[in-house]
Image (cartoon, rainbow, N blue to C red):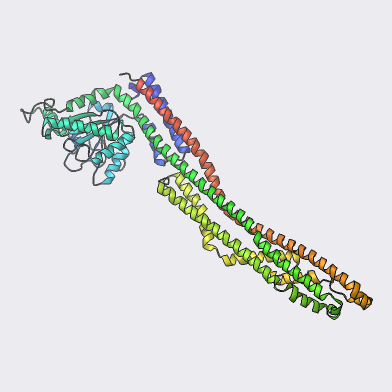
C-alpha cells in the first residue's frame, strides 16, 4: 500500500490516522459504545492492510460462482443452497486447504497476480434462514474498501436486499452492482428494464449518484474460462459475452486495470472516512439523545424540588391554624380564670380561700377544665396533618419519577437496559434515587410516625416546663401558674381586720391576680406556641432533608454528565467537519 502512495497521499494517510485516533479518544471520553471503540481501534490497523474487495448479496445470487469466474477456477463451492457459511478471504499464495482464523473466518489462497494488491472476500448470503450468517456479513461490511453487490436478473433488489444495501451505505462504502443471470433473460429488453428499475430504486430509496452496474452470467463466464484453460471448447456455437450482452469482461477489466492503482488507492483512503462519518453521526445522535435524557432528568428533579418548596411553604402557612387553635384554647382558660377570680376572691369565700387544696381542685376543675386535652388534641391533629402531608409528598415524588421514566422510554430516549456506560450509570443512580422513595412509602407507618413526633414534642415540653407528659403536664403547668402562692390569703387575713380585708385587701389582691393571670396566660401561650412551632419547623426541616438526601447525588451526576455531553457534542461536530475537509483533500489529490 505504502509503495503506491505519493508524498502528498502519504501525508493524507497520516492525517487520517491521527483523526481516527482523535475520534476514538473523543468517543471514549463521551462514553461511546465499546463496539464502536473497538471498530476504531481495528480501523487503524486496517489502514495498513491490502485493499478489500467484498462480494455481498443474498444467498443463491451466485456470489461464489462470480468470484470463481473472476479467478477462472472453482476455488469456492457453488450450488443452489447456501454454500458460504463464514467469511472467506482470498489472498495471494499457493492453493491449499483453507485456514481457520477465529470462529467465522477462513483464509483461502490462490496464485493469481492481481491478488498481490488486493484481497477478495466472499460473504455469507443475506436473507438466509440462519440469521447468524447475515449478522456475520453485516459485521464485516465496515472493513470493505469496495463492495460488489450481486443480485439476480430474475429478482433484482428485493426488500431484504434494499435493507442490506442501506446498511452498506451507512458505512459510506462505494457499491458496484453485479446483476447475475443474463443467460436466463427472456429478451434483450429485459436487461434494459432491470437496469432502469435498479437505477431508480437505488436513487430514490438509498440516494446518491447513478449506480454503477454490470450485467453478467457468472456461470457462463466460469465455464468459458475453464474450457479455455483446458484448451477445449464445450460449445463452439456459443457467441462471445459481448455479443450476448454479458459485461463480465468489462467488469474484469475494471477490477484488474482500474483498481490496480489510482482508484484503488483513493477508495482505500476514503473507506476509513466513511466509517468515521457513520460512527460520528451515530454517536452524535446517541449523545444528543443522552443529553435529552439528562435535560429531562434535570427537569423532573426541578419538579421534585418545586414540589418540596411548595410543600414546605404550604406547611409553614397552614401550620399557623393549629397554633391559633392552641392560643384560642388558652384564651378560653384566661376568660374562665378571670370569671372564677371575680366570683371566688371575695371575703365571703374566706373559708375556701384559706384551704389551698380546695382552691387548687376547684381551679383545676372549673378553670383549667378540658384545656390540656384540647391542647393535646390540637397537637395530635397538627402531627397527623404533618405526617400525612409528608406521605402525600413522597407519593407524588414516586409517581413523578415513574411517569418520567415511562415518558422517556415511550419517546425512545432510553434504550435497552444497560446498553451503554451512560445508560448503566444512569439507571444505577436513578435506582438509587427511586428506591429510597419506594422504600419510604413501603415502610411508612403513619401512626407510628405520629407517635414518634408527639413523643418528641412531649420531651420538649418536659424539658421546657419540667413536666413529664403532655396532657397531665399542661394541667400541672396551668394550676402552678394560677395558684402558686398567689391565692394563699391566710397570712393577710390573720393580720388584718376582717372588714379592712373585705373592703381593701381582697379587691386589690383580686385585681392583682387577674393581671397576673393575663400575663401568665400570655406568656404560657407565647412559650407553648413558640415551642410547638419550633418542633414543627424542626420536623419539617427533617422531612425536607430526607428528600434532599435522595435527590442530591443524582443532581450532582446530572451536572457532571451535562458538562461532559456538551463537550462531547462540540468535539464530535468538530470531528465531522474534519472528516469532510479531509475527504475533499483526498478527492483533490486524485484529479480525474
Q: Residue furthest left?
A: 237
Is 454 above or below relative to 402? below
Q: Residue furthest front?
A: 503
Closer to the camera, 136 or 330?
330
Q: In the drawing, does residue 351 fall left or right of residue 66?
A: right
Q: Residue at x 52, y 52 (%)?
A: 433
Is 437 above or below relative to 152? below
Q: Residue at x 46, y 47 (%)?
A: 424
Q: In the drawing, does residue 301 fall left or right of residue 407?
A: right
Q: Quadrant of the N terminus?
A: top left
On the image, the x and y values in percent for residue 354 come to 86, 78
Closer to the camera, 128 or 161?
161
On the image, the x and y values in percent for residue 403 come to 46, 53
Q: Residue at x 31, y 33 (%)?
A: 144
On the image, the x and y values in percent for residue 58 come to 23, 39
Q: Residue at x 20, y 43 (%)?
A: 82
Q: In the drawing, does residue 501 fall left or right of residue 213?
A: right
Quadrant in the rendering for residue 589: top left
Q: In the drawing, does residue 481 fall left or right of residue 274?
A: right
Is 500 above or below relative to 537? below
Label count reads 0
Residue 54 appears in view: no
On the image, the x and y values in percent for residue 16 come to 40, 27
Q: Quadrant of the C terminus?
A: top left
Amino acid at each position: 500500500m505504502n509503495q503506491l502512495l505519493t508524498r502528498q497521499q502519504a501525508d493524507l494517510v497520516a492525517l487520517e490516522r491521527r483523526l481516527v485516533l482523535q475520534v476514538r479518544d473523543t468517543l471514549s471520553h463521551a462514553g461511546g459504545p465499546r463496539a464502536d471503540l473497538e471498530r476504531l481501534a481495528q480501523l487503524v490497523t486496517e489502514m495498513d492492510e491490502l485493499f478489500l474487495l467484498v462480494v455481498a448479496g443474498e444467498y443463491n445470487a451466485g456470489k461464489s460462482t462470480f468470484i470463481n469466474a473472476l479467478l477462472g477456477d472453482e476455488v469456492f463451492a457453488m450450488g443452489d443452497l447456501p454454500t458460504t457459511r463464514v467469511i472467506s478471504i482470498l489472498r495471494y499464495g499457493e492453493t491449499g486447504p483453507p485456514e481457520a482464523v477465529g470462529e467465522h473466518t477462513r483464509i483461502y489462497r490462490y496464485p493469481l497476480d492481481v491478488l498481490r494488491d488486493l484481497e477478495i472476500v466472499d460473504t455469507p448470503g443475506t436473507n438466509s434462514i440462519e440469521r447468524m450468517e447475515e449478522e456475520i456479513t453485516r459485521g464485516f461490511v465496515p472493513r470493505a474498501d469496495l463492495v460488489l453487490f450481486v443480485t439476480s436478473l430474475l429478482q433484482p433488489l428485493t426488500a431484504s436486499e434494499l435493507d442490506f444495501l442501506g446498511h452498506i451505505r451507512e458505512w459510506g462504502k462505494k457499491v458496484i452492482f453485479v446483476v447475475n443471470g443474463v443467460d436466463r433473460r427472456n429478451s434483450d429488453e429485459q436487461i434494459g428494464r432491470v437496469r432502469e428499475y435498479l437505477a431508480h430504486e437505488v436513487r430514490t430509496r438509498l440516494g446518491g449518484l447513478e449506480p454503477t452496474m454490470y450485467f453478467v452470467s457468472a456461470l457462463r463466464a466460469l465455464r468459458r474460462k475453464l474450457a479455455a484453460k483446458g484448451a477445449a471448447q464445450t460449445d463452439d456455437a456459443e457467441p462471445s459475452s459481448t455479443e450476448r450482452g454479458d459485461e463480465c469482461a468489462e467488469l474484469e477489466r475494471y477490477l484488474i486495470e482500474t483498481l490496480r492503482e489510482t482508484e484503488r488507492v483513493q477508495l482505500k483512503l476514503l473507506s476509513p472516512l466513511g466509517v468515521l462519518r457513520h460512527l460520528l453521526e451515530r454517536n452524535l445522535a446517541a449523545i444528543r439523545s443522552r443529553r435529552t435524557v439528562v435535560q429531562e432528568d434535570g427537569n423532573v428533579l426541578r419538579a421534585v424540588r418545586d414540589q418540596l418548596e411548595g410543600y414546605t411553604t404550604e406547611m409553614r402557612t397552614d401550620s399557623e391554624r393549629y397554633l391559633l387553635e392552641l392560643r384560642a384554647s388558652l384564651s378560653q382558660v384566661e376568660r374562665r380564670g378571670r370569671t372564677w377570680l371575680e366570683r371566688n376572691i371575695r371575703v365571703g369565700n374566706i373559708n375556701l380561700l384559706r384551704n389551698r387544696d380546695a382552691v387548687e381542685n376547684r381551679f383545676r376543675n372549673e378553670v383549667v377544665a378540658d384545656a390540656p386535652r384540647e391542647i393535646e388534641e390540637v397537637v395530635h391533629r397538627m402531627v397527623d396533618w404533618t405526617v400525612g402531608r409528608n406521605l402525600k409528598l413522597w407519593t407524588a415524588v414516586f409517581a413523578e419519577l415513574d411517569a418520567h421514566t415511562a415518558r422517556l422510554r415511550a419517546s425512545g430516549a432510553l434504550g435497552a437496559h444497560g446498553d451503554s456506560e451512560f445508560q448503566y450509570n444512569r439507571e444505577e443512580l436513578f435506582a438509587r434515587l427511586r428506591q429510597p422513595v419506594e422504600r419510604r412509602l413501603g415502610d411508612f407507618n403513619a401512626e407510628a410516625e405520629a407517635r414518634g413526633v408527639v413523643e418528641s414534642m412531649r420531651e420538649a415540653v418536659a424539658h421546657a416546663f419540667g413536666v413529664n407528659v403532655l396532657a397531665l403536664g399542661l394541667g400541672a403547668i396551668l394550676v402552678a401558674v394560677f395558684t402558686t402562692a398567689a391565692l394563699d390569703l391566710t397570712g393577710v387575713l390573720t393580720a388584718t381586720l376582717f372588714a379592712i380585708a373585705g373592703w381593701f385587701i381582697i379587691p386589690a389582691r383580686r385585681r392583682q391576680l387577674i393581671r397576673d393571670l393575663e400575663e401568665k396566660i400570655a406568656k404560657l401561650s407565647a412559650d407553648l406556641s413558640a415551642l410547638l412551632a419550633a418542633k414543627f419547623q424542626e420536623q419539617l426541616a427533617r422531612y425536607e432533608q430526607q428528600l434532599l438526601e435522595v435527590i442530591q447525588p443524582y443532581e450532582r451526576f446530572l451536572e457532571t454528565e451535562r458538562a461532559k455531553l456538551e463537550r462531547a457534542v462540540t468535539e464530535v461536530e468538530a470531528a465531522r467537519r474534519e472528516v469532510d475537509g479531509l475527504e475533499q483533500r483526498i478527492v483533490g489529490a486524485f484529479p480525474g
